[in-house]
Amino acid sequence: MPLAPPIQEVEQSVERLLAQESLDEKTLLERFGRARGFLLESEGLFREVEDTLLVDDEGRQKLELCAREMQHSLEALNRLQEAAVSGKMLILRERLQTFLISRTRCLEYFAEFSRLAAQQPIYSPVPAFDAFIKSGIKVLEGQLDGQRLRDRFSALMPELHKVQRLVGLLPRLHEPPQELMLALNQGLQGLQTGYGALAQYLEKGDRVALEDGLKLLGSSSNILNDQLARAEQFAQGAARYSKFRPVEEWLRLKDYVLKKPEDKIPPAWIGFTVAQVFLMWDFLLDQAQGLLDNPLLRELELTDGVTVELLEESLAARAVADQELAPLTGQALMQSSETLWLEKTKAAESLQAAVAQSLQHLDEAMAPYRELPGLENIVLLKDQVKKGLVDKASLRNEFHNQLQRVEELLESVRQGQDPISVEFRDILPIHRSAFMGMLENLESDDWFGLENRWQGVVSTLPHLADLSRNIRQRLKAQGSASKRIQCVRCGNSNEPTRRVCSSCGANLPTVIQKMQTFSEIDTGQGGPTVGLAPRAIDLLESMVQGLESNQTTKKDAAEALQLLIDDVSRQRQMFTKKLLPLMGKDETLDSYLRYFAQGLGQYFTNLNELQQAVREGSLPRLHSGLTLVRDTLDTLDAMKDRIDEALAG
């Protein structure tokens, strides 16, 4: 994991001192000061993420460890500075290593927490709102001091201003449907009311106002997000001036202001619309440079998309625009000609089309890697290590990570007899051998051998991706629409990741999935009937998806599986009591009953193995277990039908 530039500066300075090179004290103190400022900024970012994480006891312990480690990093930096300035050469390297090790631990912790923050259930599609709502929930539950909300509230104001500008400009620049504008205005009104309730809490400490404000913030931003997406699609109609959207929006706005001067458009709206032209152009330039540097695209040797010549042309045009367009303000801005803007920004329009083309090529090149996450990191790291931009320890760690993934996949399909498991078992050892070989090549700087082995891995990717895709599509096909969450207020069907209805904003149920009605075997003797719940697969699939996205804890998943295990135990007892006495009357029925009894035992074993995989946190074993459970339930369901027919006969 690469270190930040301020940390690298300190490391390089200390290495120079250890090599007996001279370095003046002023420069040394400046570099340590930048590193100290970076650590303090990192701690502030960590506190923001900490406020929004919804974690269990284990997670809270990790947060505490991370906080201690960050404090330890600061102390280690101070001790390192003292040794460097005082010339204590005997302990200088030891203190440098102590500091770097502590910093690496902080990076690992922070990377994990950032991933969790991004994957946890969202209450709003707007990150600033989502973070604020999570913090507000912690305040209501007594886990966080209310002052932290006060500090965060000011960061929400730009989001409100952005929505006000988007909703206000849409009818002035376009002709949207009336029902769209009605929905947008209602969403904006709800958002503004939520801000008012939050301000009341911050002023008077009214917890009811806080609850109302958080609900309105989540529901209104969800509604607005969907409606603004509709507005964006509507605004992407035929271009009047330019295919570069920021220029198109600005020239439409300028035309409107000149035609209707009585409509006093807020100056901030005009300024922001103009600024977007330059901001988006700079964003495209950064994207284009990244695409040119991307090793996946370089290997394709494309003839279209972003080229060095096109990027240089756009950079030159951007410099001209910065001199001739950016300084325009007030009346000069409003009187500037459309021709001038179109002429000076034509390069941005061309760059936008080229970036879109290159991104499409990159998407195609990334397709196999998306099915097998982690491998794309190796493509980038190989290139960076060769150029000396990244230490080869990062690539070594990625190879080790891939070896671990291969072992987990092998373990998950070791007992499977289905065709996919068999094919995985044939291909995965090749990957394991290749990664072990690449580790040896890396240590000996044998890049020719490493590349040869890597190409061997790449050659198997399409087939592995197909196998992975088949599993995923099968899971999707076997899934049930009932996994979508239905709103109890308006009946709208919502994605399972939502926490508020996308239609009316009401809070949605958070239960994963209930067990559905049992398929029953009627013994014809009255009393209880024996049966299984084949659609229990819905519960299991929802549970695995919840574990993958951190919407379900290991504890909740293990408890849900225990309920299924207990239920199957009751079914086995009932089977013994009700159906075994029927054996001996018909040979065909006897065979069906034996198969059914064996299937019950297999299902019981499958559930226990799934529970063990949940406790160990092994997602590959969970996916493999799902496949086995589905096959077992399908077999049991078919056998149940045959038993019913035999009993009826």
Image (cartoon, rainbow, N blue to C red):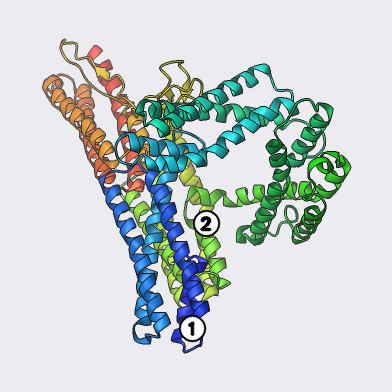
Q: Position of residue 22 (x, y in %)?
A: 51, 87
Q: Position of residue 178 (x, y in %)?
A: 67, 17
Which residue sits at x=39%, y=65%?
Answer: 103
Q: Quadrant of residue 235?
A: top right
Label 1 or label 2, whichever comes before in sequence order: 1
Q: CA distance from mark 1 to mark 2?
A: 35 Å
Q: Quadrant of residue 229?
A: top right
Farthest bottom residue in view: 20
Density class for disc 2 (Cα within 10 Å; few <14, some 14-19, many ≥20) is some
Checking the image for residue 16, the label placed there is 1
Which residue sits at x=27%, y=51%?
Answer: 61
Q: Position of residue 367 (x, y in %)?
A: 56, 48
Amino acid identity at mark 2: Glu
- Answer above or below: position of 191 versus 11: above
Q: Position of residue 297 (x, y in %)?
A: 65, 57
Label 2 residue SS:
helix
Amino acid identity at mark 1: Arg
Screen quadrant of the N terminus:
bottom left
Along the viewing direction, whichever of 149 and 604 lies nearer the viewer:
149
Label 1 residue SS:
helix
- Answer above or below: position of 332 versus 237: below
Checking the image for residue 82, the label placed there is none
Density class for disc 1 (Cα within 10 Å; few <14, some 14-19, many ≥20) is few
Residue identifier under label 2:
376
Q: Quadrant of residue 538?
A: top left
Along the viewing direction, whichever of 634 and 511 lies nearer the viewer:
511
